[in-house]
Image: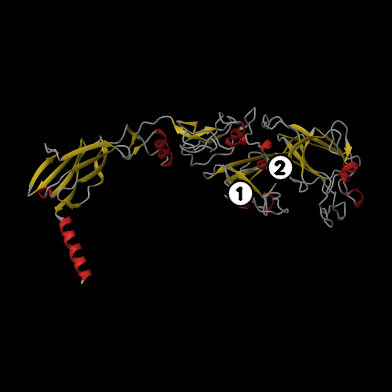
């Protein structure tokens, strides 16, 4: 694929190891890494596991990859792949395949090392057109009447491979051209290709769940390689066209081609044995995946989600996200700017607050659920509604100094439940007076906010005389207690003094 791609508006750069392209996963693809053996329930199979970290080889997200090799009683080798986002990652691209080389002649002598005589019969009626760098152009082309036609009649690889410039067959053959309707079904493998050796009589058939496969005839195998020596055969050199590959996969470079995005991989019959155990940090609970098969972490409040009401292209983009978790619903955002792409996010269905046993008020059921999962269910619901708390003054009034005849305003912001009542008091010459009393120059206003379970009150004094100097106290009270905060008001003829100083400064300047 091209060594860069864009996913949900963000561009990612990959390691370019094939000109401007990234081949086989980059500098150290999965074929060059050490894997961990996973627990196996059968003597006929082996499961390997590998974690790919965020931005490893340039790819976003952390994923767990599992591959299971099984030998069946029908002399078959079955390979099952599973990849899953982990550690809170929410997006990536992945396209797993196998790159083994086959030579049905057995390669037991130098004369039989080439695969030109192998007969090929395909079920693929289309192939992906490519540019000079073997990157798909986006065109799904019929094989009829071309050198790519292996339908109905078996044809030898050597019959036309040299007519495929510059390196023979290294193309993606399409089994399912309808990318909109494609769905994976691991219990219903579709026959893709059959290869036969007239020399040995060996026949090999590959079936797959994938919509396509790469057919590579080994033109770039370097000369000088030697197969493993056996008890009956000596080693000898092999090179180009000594083996072929059948790489079942999604369309190469699909993320850069609008018409070949294949993200949703549903199966008509669920196979739980292929499911990967989800992360323990599922703070919105466990849900069934989009295919109603495996348990996955539900999307959390405010996270992007899978929404079927989006337009065709955006619907495909949203398929990388799973559904919302407990008590959440995937809804289109209503706060987008003109020209922005529509997005869907998880919205909590139960918006009433909850008081937890930890004494914290949670804004809704979903935030309470997240906290409960984080604490491994040690948190419980105390009551519906906010937790009862004594008043807490968030923003107290501040000291003010001003001139006689001016206006001043004190403010006091308080939090608590039940919502506190606020009153103002003034202490002057050891006399306390409840405000506003009946003075037309004193007014009090209060309103809820700015946040939940808060109230803000303002005390305004107009045309103030010198005797208004004193201490002003905000008193907040509810059934759980009382809280106070004070500020001092200083009134004087500061403007007159300021003018006198200015006159003196002017006289000094004149001297």
Q: Is residue 37 above or below residue 180?
A: below
Mark 1: few/some/many CA within 10 Å (<14, 14-19, 20+): some
Residue 422 showing in the rendered view = no
Mark 2: few/some/many CA within 10 Å (<14, 14-19, 20+): many
- Residue 77 falls left or right of residue 5: right
**Where does residue 261 sit, x and y in percent of width and height?**
66, 37
Residue 108's mark? Answer: none
Residue 502 showing in the rendered view = yes
Tag 2–tag 1 contact (CB < 8 Å): no
> Mark 2, mark 1: which one is toward the viewer?
1
**Where does residue 368 sit, x and y in percent of width and height?**
39, 36
Badge 1 marks a residue whose secondary structure is strand
- Which one is nearer the viewer's eye here, 455 or 217? 455
Q: Quadrant of the C terminus?
A: bottom left
**Where does residue 66 sit, x and y in percent of width and height?**
63, 43
Q: Which residue is mark 2?
A: 252
Badge 2 marks a residue whose secondary structure is loop
- Which one is nearer the viewer's eye here, 46 or 480? 480
- Residue furthest to the front: 510
At horizontal 55% and vertical 42% (from top left) the residue drawn is 90
At horizontal 46% and vertical 39% (from top left) the residue drawn is 283
**Where does residue 229 sit, x and y in percent of width and height?**
83, 54
Tell me the distance, in whole angstroms, between the alpha carbons under discs 2 and 1. Answer: 17 Å
- Which one is nearer the viewer's eye here, 471 or 509? 509
Earlier-in-chain disc, 2 versus 1:
1
At horizontal 14% and vertical 43% (from top left) the residue drawn is 425
- Residue 270 falls left or right of residue 349: right
Q: Quadrant of residue 235?
A: bottom right
Residue 12's mark? Answer: 1
- Residue 364 falls left or right of residue 57: left
């Amino acid at each position: 694929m091209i060594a860069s791609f864009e996913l949900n508006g963000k561009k990612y750069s990959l390691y370019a190891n094939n000109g401007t392209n990234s081949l086989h996963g980059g500098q150290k693809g999965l074929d060059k890494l050490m894997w961990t053996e996973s627990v196996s329930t059968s003597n006929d199979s082996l499961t390997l596991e590998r974690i790919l970290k965020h931005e490893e080889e340039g790819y976003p997200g952390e994923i767990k990859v599992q591959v299971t090799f099984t030998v069946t009683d029908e002399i078959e080798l079955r390979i099952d792949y599973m990849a899953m986002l982990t550690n809170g990652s929410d997006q990536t691209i992945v396209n797993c395949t196998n790159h083994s080389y086959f030579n049905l002649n057995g390669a037991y002598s130098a004369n039989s090392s080439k695969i030109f005589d192998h007969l090929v019969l395909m079920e693929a009626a289309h192939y992906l057109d490519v540019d000079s760098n073997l990157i798909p152009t986006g065109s799904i082309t019929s094989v009829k009447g071309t050198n790519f036609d292996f339908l109905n009649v078996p044809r030898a690889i050597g019959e036309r491979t040299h007519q495929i410039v510059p390196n023979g067959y290294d193309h993606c053959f399409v089994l399912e051209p309808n990318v909109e309707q494609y769905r994976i079904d691991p219990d219903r493998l579709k026959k893709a290709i059959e290869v036969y050796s007239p020399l040995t009589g060996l026949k090999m058939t590959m079936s797959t769940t994938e919509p396509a496969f790469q057919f590579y005839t080994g033109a770039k195998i370097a000369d000088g390689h030697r197969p493993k020596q056996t008890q009956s055969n000596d080693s000898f050199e092999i090179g180009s066209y000594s083996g072929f590959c059948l790489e079942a996969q999604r369309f190469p470079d699909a993320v850069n081609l609008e018409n070949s995005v294949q993200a949703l991989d549903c199966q008509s019959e669920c196979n739980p044995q292929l499911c990967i155990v989800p992360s323990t940090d599922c703070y919105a609970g466990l849900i069934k995946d989009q295919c109603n098969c495996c348990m996955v972490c539900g999307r959390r409040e405010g996270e992007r989600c899978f929404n079927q009401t989006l337009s065709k292209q955006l619907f495909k983009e949203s398929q990388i996200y799973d559904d919302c978790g407990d008590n959440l619903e995937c809804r289109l955002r209503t706060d987008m700017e003109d020209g922005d792409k529509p997005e869907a996010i998880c919205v909590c269905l139960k918006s009433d607050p909850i008081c937890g046993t930890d004494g914290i008020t949670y804004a809704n059921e979903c935030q309470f659920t997240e906290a409960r999962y984080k604490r491994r269910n040690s948190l419980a619901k105390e009551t519906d509604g906010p937790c009862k708390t004594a008043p807490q003054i968030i923003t107290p009034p501040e000291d003010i100094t001003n001139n006689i005849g001016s206006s001043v305003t004190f403010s006091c912001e308080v939090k608590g439940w039940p919502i506190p009542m606020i009153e103002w008091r003034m202490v002057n010459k050891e006399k306390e007076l409840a405000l506003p009393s009946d003075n037309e120059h004193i007014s009090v206003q209060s309103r809820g906010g700015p946040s939940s379970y808060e109230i803000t009150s303002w005390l305004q004094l107009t045309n103030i005389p010198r005797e208004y100097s004193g201490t002003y106290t905000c008193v907040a009270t509810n059934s759980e207690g009382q809280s106070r905060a004070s500020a001092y008001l200083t009134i004087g003829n500061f403007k007159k003094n300021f003018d006198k100083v200015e006159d003196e400064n002017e006289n000094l300047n004149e001297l």
